[in-house]
Image: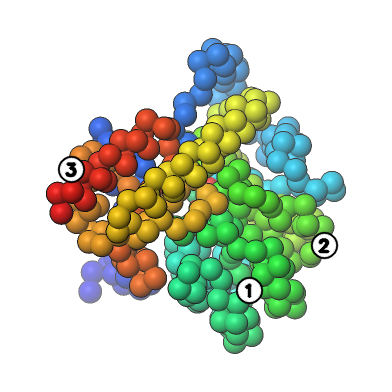
Amino acid sequence: MSLISTIIRPEILAQSSYHVPDAHNMVKLDAMENPYPLPDAIKAEFGAHLAHVALNRYPVPTYRLLKDKICREFGIPAGFDVMLGNGSDELISMLSIACAKPGAKVVAPIPTFVMYAISAQLAGMEFVGVPLSEDLGLDMSAMLAAIQEHRPALLYLANPNNPTGSWFDEADLLQLINAMSDIGLVVIDEAYQPFAPSSMMPRLPEFAHVIVMRTVSKIGLAGLRLGYMSAAPELLAEVEKVRPPYNINVLTAAAAEFLLDHMSIFDEQAHKLCVEREALIKELQSIKNVHAFPSKANFVLIKIENSEQIFKKLLARRILIKNVGKMHPLLTNCLRVTVSTPEENRLFIDALKATLLEA
Ligand SMILES: *Cc1c(COP(=O)(O)O)cnc(C)c1O
């Protein structure tokens, strides 16, 4: 056996690395990015702001100014604080590390965001996925049974869910939160909150074991790598101990501090994307043999015969979407497309129609 294969943990040797396709020259509709660049009107001011950042200094490790602005702009309940991550990916990873006692488990409905399982496994925890129902909603009896059987340290609920776009009822979430109250922590992942009808954030003070997690990635700042989460202060204080002291770099912090004073830009873009989402769903539903699932996020899941072939033909037409057909049996023949500008959505629809005609 080679040195590498004896030293590296077997569960890591067994994993395949996260594949990111080459998007050069593509209409990029695969990663839920906001298509709108920063408006020219604020670019110069933004540049000047960043030019004053002290790159020779470590970040101020409390990140107090940035956290205060996040609390103010994103409706964090009074008396509650946030913890920052290098993207919410890092928050998920830190939660795993904090909870990875021997035998500790992580539960989530599946298909869902893949990092919950990957991060659990990297931390040495068992991940248990509970399949969604056929209509991609929560299978409540299976969820409640899994909670009793596995007694998970962490339960993840992405709402809206990725890659399905499903929106879970607050009553169902509350039932799962109650079922978990003497068992483990519940993470409500609101990565798509700007496109969703409501949030759990205001109800956070009612629970000692609930974490609400969000990111600025999907509202137009994916390149910044900034996620945040809030929870009861006693809980947050423990997870904070896992955080590397300077995990948010000075440029990200300075950029976010500046942009949080211009949130109306991103709110307007999110609103436009919601309008576009409904138009896109309607258009997709009018195409024969295409089923578009309802979505409360900035993407739409579609089911279509020969999805594999359609995906490849769209690629040939320089349209990059996400092929999720192999993720889970519930997603057989499914593709996921990010909602973009009216122009890019049109390019996608036209390419899809042309592809279907060829078939
Ligand atoms: C995109 C996504 C994230 C990751 O966000 P980053 O802050 O970019 O790491 C987290 N959760 C869900 C459900 C997502 O879809």
Q: Nearer the viewer, residue 286 or 337?
A: 286
Q: CA distance from mark 2 to mark 3?
A: 51 Å
Q: What residue occupies the far left of the structure in this picture? A: 358
Image mark for residue 25: none
Q: Quadrant of residue 359?
A: bottom left
Question: Vertical placement of 236 versus 246: above or below?
Answer: below
Q: Quadrant of residue 104?
A: bottom right
Residue type, numbered disc 3:
Ala
**Label 2 or label 3, whichever comes before in sequence order:** 2
Query: Can residue 80 be seen in this snapshot?
Result: yes
Residue type, numbered disc 1:
Ala
> What residue sits 57% from the left and 16% below the top?
42
Label 2: which secondary element:
helix
Q: Nearer the viewer, residue 226 or 24?
A: 24
Q: Is residue 203 left or right of residue 311?
A: right
List the residue tagged with mark 2.
206
Mark 2, ligand 1, within 8 Å: the answer is no
Label 1: which secondary element:
loop
List the residue tagged with mark 1.
153
**Label 3 or label 1, whichever comes before in sequence order:** 1
Q: Position of residue 6 (x, y in %)?
A: 31, 72
**Which label sits in the foreground, 2 or 3?**
3
> What residue sits 32% from the left and 51% below the top?
287
